[in-house]
Image (tube, rainbow, N blue to C red):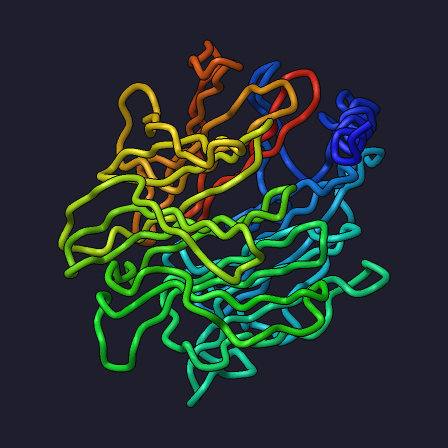
Amino acid sequence: MNHHLAKRIMSVCLWSLVVAAADALPQASRQGTDVVSIWRTPDGGLQPQAVVDSAGGLHLIYFKGAPSAGDIFYVHRSPRDTAFSAPVRVNSQPGSAVAVGSVRGAHIAAGREGRVHIAWMGSRDALPKGPENATPMLYARSNNKRTAFEAQRNVVQFAAGLDGGGSVAADDKGNVYVAWHAGAEGGGEESRRMWVARSADDGETFGREVPASDAATGACGCCGMRAFADRDGTLYMLYRAATKGVDRDMYLVRSNDNGRSFRSTRLHAWRLEACPMSTASISEGVGETLLAWETNGQVYYSRVGRKTSEAAPPVPAPGEGLRRKHPAVIANSEGKTIFLWTEKTGWKKGGSVAWQVFDESGRPTAEKGVADGVPAWSLVTAYALPGGRFAIIY
């Protein structure tokens, strides 16, 4: 039996042991339907980000504290647990994370043997600083015993000038990538481009960052980006361009050789003479990679086939909504997909989470809904459960 298939089957079996017990989690209030469960972020946190490792373990991070200088907390739950672990602070320097704008928060990835990797844009007083006292792109990984996190480190060696945060990706071979966008000193958005620092030893050391996007596209300064590595080790990154300061097109960057070379594809055009402060999402489906982004007040998702490496035409969220932003897309082992996003959020303003479930052929099902209560500066996340179920955390 294929090694990856065996791990997937084991993960589903382990999750099946606790599907019923999952409704008893004490850290969150539940609502939703038989297919979609809705949970509040533990401890009243902001910007939850969830990932499930190859053994079926759920890892979750969230932000607490002042939006301009707060902390990142981590909890986890194995398939046999009925509650999250006690929260552990990720950042070794208190107040070194930032939530303002909803685009600069922490991202999480699970790598080899379940090691957790977290990266975030530092706050104004975060240490260690980048070159010439610049804002750092910080990184921390779980220790060898997986009980706490090592001291935070800055991975920016020369490509300083962070604004829209960054992201992290990891695979089962020990590769870890921290990505961000930055530009030439004194230059505008047109001078920005994507940069990637790579580790080949599970985050023990990082090499000097390398450019990953075409310099001609620029990069939207206050827009977030997303990195992800699939089970085959392919690295994907989503970012928003700023060509000539007005073309805010969405681009997919792909590397099939562990970050040594990159290929860019334009996914969606958007002409706008402003920064939309958008975020993006990438996750793994069955034989494909799922992408989600915002364009002109609407959110879209697309599928990238692993064999063809081509992105399918973007699919908009169905129905009508108001100020749709911050999408996420997750698939389960049965091929069903949940697409979720926020509505009516804005600067210092919360809103709602909305979602739509799609069947194996990509058709929308009757499973859809809206729930109020997304806090200001927050995001939404989700993960798959067996039996065609999903859980949303917001």
In this orientation, does residue 82 appear?
no
Q: Nearer the viewer, residue 290 or 375?
A: 290
Pick the quarter of the image with the N terminus: top right
x and y, in percent, of residue 320 in the image: 27, 22
The image position of residue 191, as x and y in percent, is: 25, 70
Residue 263 x %, y %:
40, 52
**Residue depicted at 79% across the width and 65% down the height:** 143
Is residue 50 or residue 313 the one in the foreground?
313
Is 141 rendered above or below residue 309? below
* Left or right placement of residue 312 versus residue 140 in this view: left
Residue at x 46%, y 70% (from the top left corner): 210
Q: Position of residue 183 (x, y in %)?
A: 31, 73
Residue nearer the viewer, 154 or 362: 362
Residue 380 visible in the current orientation: yes
Extreme residue in the top direction: 366
* In this rendering, position of residue 222 left or right of residue 372: left
